[in-house]
Image: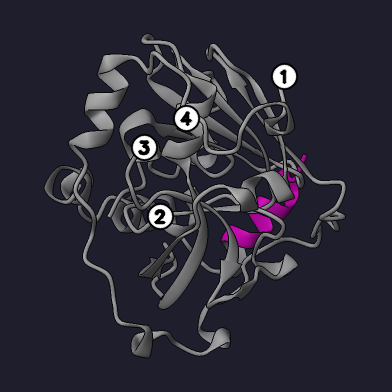
């Protein structure tokens, strides 16, 4: 839908495919290996459904967190550049819904208020863009692993897709998605997330480059296999894993 805009964006930044692959593959798996339907209104918030399959549970427990920065290191708001096209979706937070579905035993439809009732996790990490800039940001939200516990992915799941309100789409490996610092965030620097930064809900993690961290997320889908469409930028030549 945005092919012309994507091509224009690449030309504007004078980025070759080789540059993109070099930047996005700086350390590949290094950080990960080294550091790393229903509505909740009908169920008690925070309830973990059993059984949570042993493979996914073990995967979650084996993940190591990336060292964080002190709050004093948080950089000014303008350090986090806003890279988007002409379309910035305007989503009413009161009408917002997040679908968690796919190969799961307990599909979910969550309002923003439902997400805010789950345990809040905050992290102060470096957000790294493939264009060569970075900013230290504090994100606040719910761990994606908490949503996985509620949705109960099947033992065959290997990947997670993220769909956004503006048509953006991404896919991650399951291990990265379940990392303890992979969050679905609704706060930035202790304040409600701005729409320019992805409100009401965006993906954030210190183990992935910025283009992997989808904004305006409305759907999370657990799948066994990758589909031909792997990611908005990856389908134009970006490296798929996008790790730091």
Q: Residues within 10 Å of mark 3 (few under 14, many from 20)?
A: many
Q: Residue at label 3?
A: 178
Left or right, 178 with reference to 121: left
Q: Give the Cα separation between the discs numbered 3 and 1.
A: 21 Å
Residue 99 appears in the rendering: yes
- Quarter of the figure with residue 55: top left
Q: Residue at label 1?
A: 37
Q: Residue at label 2?
A: 205
Q: Give the Cα separation between the discs numbered 4 and 3.
A: 8 Å
For the point 38% across and 9% down, which residue is it? 156
Q: Give the Cα separation between the discs numbered 3 and 2.
A: 10 Å
For the point 54% across and 23% down, which residue is it? 151
Residue 112 at what x, y percent from top left? 72, 49
Q: Are marks 4 and 3 in contact (CB under 8 Å)?
A: yes
Q: Residues within 10 Å of mark 4 (few under 14, many from 20)?
A: many
Q: Residues within 10 Å of mark 1 (few under 14, many from 20)?
A: few
Camera-nearest residue between 40 and 62? 40
Q: Residues within 10 Å of mark 2 (few under 14, many from 20)?
A: many
**Magenta region:** 1-10
Q: Are marks 1 and 4 in contact (CB under 8 Å)?
A: no
Nearer the viewer's eye, disc 3 or disc 1? 1
Does residue 119 lie above or below 170 as drawn?
below
Q: Residue at label 4?
A: 148
Badge 1 or badge 4: first in the primary sequence? 1
Badge 3 or badge 1: first in the primary sequence? 1
Q: Inspect the magenta stretch and tell me whether residue 154 lies in it.
A: no
Does residue 232 lie above or below 154 as drawn?
below
Q: Inspect the magenta stretch and tell me whether residue 5 lies in it.
A: yes
- Quarter of the figure with residue 81: bottom right
Q: Give the Cα separation between the discs numbered 1 and 4.
A: 14 Å
């Amino acid at each position: 839908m945005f092919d012309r805009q994507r091509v224009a964006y690449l030309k504007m930044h004078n980025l070759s495919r080789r540059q993109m692959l070099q930047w996005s593959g700086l350390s590949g798996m290094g950080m990960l290996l080294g550091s790393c339907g229903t509505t909740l209104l009908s169920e008690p918030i925070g309830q973990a459904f059993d059984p949570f399959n042993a493979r996914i549970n073990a995967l979650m427990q084996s993940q190591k967190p990336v060292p964080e920065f002190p709050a004093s290191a948080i950089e000014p708001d303008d350090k986090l550049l806003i890279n988007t096209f002409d379309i910035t979706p305007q989503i009413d937070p009161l009408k917002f819904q997040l679908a968690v579905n796919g190969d799961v035993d307990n599909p979910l439809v969550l309002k923003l208020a439902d997400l805010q009732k789950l345990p809040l996790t905050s992290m102060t990490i470096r957000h790294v863009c493939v264009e060569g800039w970075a900013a230290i940001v504090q994100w606040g939200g719910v761990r994606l692993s908490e949503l996985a516990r509620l949705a109960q992915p099947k033992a065959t799941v290997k990947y997670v897709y993220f769909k956004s309100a503006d048509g953006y789409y991404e896919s991650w490996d399951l291990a990265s998605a379940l990392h303890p610092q992979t969050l679905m965030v609704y706060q930035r620097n202790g304040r409600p997330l701005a729409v320019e930064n992805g409100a009401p809900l965006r993906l954030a993690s210190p183990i992935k480059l910025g283009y992997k961290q989808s904004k305006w997320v409305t759907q999370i889908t657990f799948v066994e296999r990758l589909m031909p469409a792997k990611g908005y930028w990856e389908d134009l030549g970006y490296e798929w894993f996008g790790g730091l």
